[in-house]
Image (cartoon, grey):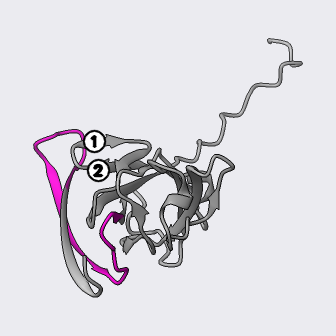
């Protein structure tokens, strides 16, 4: 990968209950991080679906937690700086990145090839939440794999495409309870 090279990623996600009814999203990522031989990265396309797709504020922050496990101890990779916090075993660590809705963002750094990356998101941390809505579990899509977390293995000089969709649904306000009869009044 070369600096300022634009890479395209195309993903399809089901829209609604019917698998045949799907939406396809195409996005480009401008990679400004140079990936040296033996290193790679990933990028995330962040989408919001469900009832709230048009009421989520543009300044809403979505934080993705990143856990990583290196194939060898970090000291082997001369000149490479582990992102975030490196654990005492010198092989595992954690960091995070913040995205906005409909953002296509590359992780601002690289990892050694064969590093295992585990992505997760705590929907309780999404700030601000739209009034009257509740967030469903996040859905990560990487290749053909889909789930509430995303796992990938870093490839040499490649940026792996990740799709992250958050779906929010409107929580109905319960109707006013029916007035109850006065239990102390005696029948006539």
Q: Is residue 138 above or below residue 156?
A: above
Percent from the top left, x then y, of residue 64? 51, 59
For residue 185, side relative to residue 142 (left or right): right
Q: Is residue 4 magenta?
A: no
For residue 100, side relative to residue 92 (left or right): left
Q: Is residue 30 magenta?
A: yes
Q: Is residue 135 above or below residue 2?
A: above
Q: Is residue 13 above or below residue 36?
A: above
Cβ atoms at labels 1 and 2 below 8 Å apart:
yes
Residue plotted at (25% across, 82% down): 2
Q: Please identify the quadrant where the C terminus is shown.
A: top right
As helix, strand or loop, the secondary structure at mark 1 comes to strand
Residue 110: which disc?
none
Labels in figure, total: 2
Seen from this angle, which residue lies furthest top?
Answer: 187
Residue 50 quadrant: bottom left
Residue closer to the observer: 10 or 132:
10
Q: Please identify the quadrant where the N terminus is shown.
A: bottom left
Residue plotted at (52% across, 47% down): 172
Question: Which residue is under mark 2?
Answer: 142
Percent from the top left, x then y, of residue 82? 55, 65
As helix, strand or loop, the secondary structure at mark 2 comes to strand
Task: Point out the stretch of residues depicted in magenta.
Answer: 12-41
- Please say whether residue 130 is visible from this viewpoint: no
Percent from the top left, x then y, of residue 142? 29, 50
Residue closer to the observer: 11 or 42:
42
- Please say whether residue 47 is visible from this viewpoint: yes
Residue 178 quadrant: top right
Question: Which residue is under mark 1?
Answer: 145
Q: Is residue 95 above or below residue 135?
A: below
């Amino acid at each position: 990968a070369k600096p300022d090279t634009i890479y395209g990623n195309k993903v399809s996600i089901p829209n609604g209950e019917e698998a045949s009814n799907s939406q396809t999203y195409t996005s480009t990522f401008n990679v400004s991080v140079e990936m040296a031989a033996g290193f790679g990265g990933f990028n995330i396309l962040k989408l919001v679906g469900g009832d709230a797709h048009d009421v989520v504020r543009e300044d809403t922050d979505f934080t993705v937690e990143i856990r990583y496990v290196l194939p060898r101890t970090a000291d082997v990779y001369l000149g490479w700086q582990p992102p975030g916090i490196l654990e005492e075993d010198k092989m595992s660590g954690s960091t995070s990145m913040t995205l906005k809705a409909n953002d296509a963002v590359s992780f601002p750094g690289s990892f050694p090839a064969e590093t295992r990356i585990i992505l997760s998101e705590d929907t309780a941390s999404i700030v601000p939440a739209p009034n009257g809505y509740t967030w469903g579990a996040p859905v990560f899509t990487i290749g053909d794999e889909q789930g509430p977390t995303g796992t990938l293995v870093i490839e040499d000089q490649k940026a792996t495409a990740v799709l992250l969709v958050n779906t929010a649904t409107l929580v109905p306000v319960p109707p006013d309870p029916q007035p109850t009869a006065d239990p102390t009044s005696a029948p006539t």
